[in-house]
Amino acid sequence: MNKRSIFKYLGLVVAIAILIFGFDKLLIPGISRQPTPIVIKLSGWGSSPTEQELLRDVLKDFEAKHPAIKVKYEVIADQYMDVIKTRLIGEAAPDVFYLDVLEAPFLMSQNVLEPLNNYITPEFDLGDFEETLLNSFKYNNNIYGFPKDYSTLALFCNQEAFSAAGLTTAPKDWMNY
């Protein structure tokens, strides 16, 4: 094959490639082309049926306001943090995921989470969050997450058991417990 034939052949290949890839962009009357939606993967742990229903409503509202974005929600039913950490290591983590406040400092310090500062617009009111809850997701002047809820765990003392043990009052802090 001489040089002229090679150039003709390459020209033909390039022309065919342009036609194939360009045809997809060609506007044909009567055929509307919908852009391929962006799919965001959200992972969380299981919760009550009421919370699941509320989340479905929130996601439906989000998708209605942002039709080019679809959210795929995945419940990780068992060993949640083990699954998330394994996926982070394997670069297969969800785009958005629930993160317990006790696990956040380690993941923030390992640079595996994206700081959200650049996504926070003036319309997004950080004052809507309790400062102590929001501070739990801050590291090196960056915000890595927002609290979705909080726990109301409490310690109750059985006064009869305290009296039987000779104690008159409950401890005021952990140091005196």
Image (tube, rainbow, N blue to C red):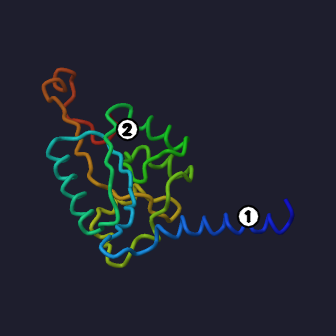
Name the image quarter holding the N terminus: bottom right
Q: Nearer the viewer, mark 2 or mark 1?
A: 1
What amino acid type should be assigned to the residue bearing mark 2?
Met
- Measuring 44% from the left and 41% from the top, which residue is drawn there? 84
Please state which of residues 79 and 153 is positioned toward the viewer in this rendering. 79
Q: Is residue 52 above or below residue 161?
A: below
Q: Is residue 66 above or below residue 90?
A: below
Q: Label 1 belongs to which residue?
A: 9
Q: Is residue 80 above or below residue 105?
A: above
Query: Where is residue 56 drawn, in percent x and y?
Result: 21, 52
Disc 1 is placed on an element classified as: helix
Query: Where is residue 6 drawn, in percent x and y?
Result: 80, 64
Q: Label 2 belongs to which residue?
A: 175
Mark 2 or mark 1: which comes first in sequence? 1
- Measuring 31% from the left and 48% from the top, which residue is drawn there? 73
Query: Where is residue 88 drawn, in percent x and y?
Result: 51, 44
Disc 2 is placed on an element classified as: helix
Alpha-carbon distance for marks 2 and 1? 83 Å
What amino acid type should be assigned to the residue bearing mark 1?
Tyr
Please state which of residues 167 and 57 is positioned toward the viewer in this rendering. 57
Please state which of residues 107 and 37 is positioned toward the viewer in this rendering. 37
